[in-house]
Image (spheres, rainbow, N blue to C red):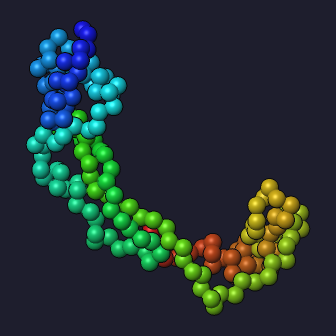
Amino acid sequence: MNWTDERVEKLKKLWSEGLSASQIAAQLGGVSRNAVIGKVHRLCLPGRAKAGGSTAATARVKRPATSAPRAPNYASRLATRTVTRTAGATVMKEEVEIDTIEDQDAAPASNVVVPMSRRLALTQLTDRTCKWPIGDPMKEEFHFCGNDSPDTSPYCTFHAKLAYQPSGERRRAR
């Protein structure tokens, strides 16, 4: 089967009207559903127009989740994304609104005191020194904190607070 200019134009028209590949193949005649899908892909046609479909499913997908709490250092905005869903044996593409989250630069607290590190190398660490890595391990200035650590922790008090956060705070930060 050859794709003449006339058949391609009819394919584009039917596709923009929201007909499925099976329906288009039946109207064109002498062509399979897969041939229609392949031609649509090669023509880089956008997603089909909505042809009815389940309005309940569409409404459920398009509703942004506004009740979920957001951490204070995040900003959200609405964006659209093309997703696929099935309706019987037909896979349909549709534009849905999604709630995206972007990182915002948070200003560090001004009352935090960061202890001076002893700048120990790996070979200088003991059971009683803080093993918090500082810097890039591939750089020459890489070192470990080296401050005194309690018996139960590999880190000093300051770095233990960074490493071990209560589960409630982790859930709030998400």
State the residue lying farthest toward the right. Answer: 124
Of the 4 image quadrants, the one containing the N terminus is top left
State the residue lying farthest toward the front. Answer: 5
Of the 4 image quadrants, the one containing the C terminus is bottom left
Which residue appears at 34% of the width and 58% of the height? 79
State the residue lying farthest toward the top. Answer: 1
Q: Where does residue 168 sit, x and y in percent of width and height?
A: 46, 76
Q: Nearer the viewer, residue 151 or 44?
A: 44
Q: Is residue 95 above or below residue 76?
A: above
11 horizontally vs 98: left or right: left
Could you tell me how many numbered marks the image carries?
0
The answer to whether residue 20 of the structure is visible from this angle is no
Q: Quadrant of residue 109?
A: bottom right
Q: Where does residue 15 sit, x and y in percent of width and height?
A: 19, 31
Q: Quadrant of residue 90?
A: top left
Q: Is residue 126 above or below residue 156?
A: above
Which residue appears at 80% of the width and 69% of the height? 144
Q: Where does residue 152 sit, x and y in percent of width and height?
A: 70, 76
111 horizontally vs 129: left or right: left
The answer to whether residue 64 of the structure is visible from this angle is yes
Which residue appears at 17% of the width and 11% of the height? 30
Which residue appears at 63% of the width and 75% of the height? 162
Q: Where does residue 133 sit, x and y in percent of width and height?
A: 75, 67
Q: Quadrant of residue 91?
A: top left
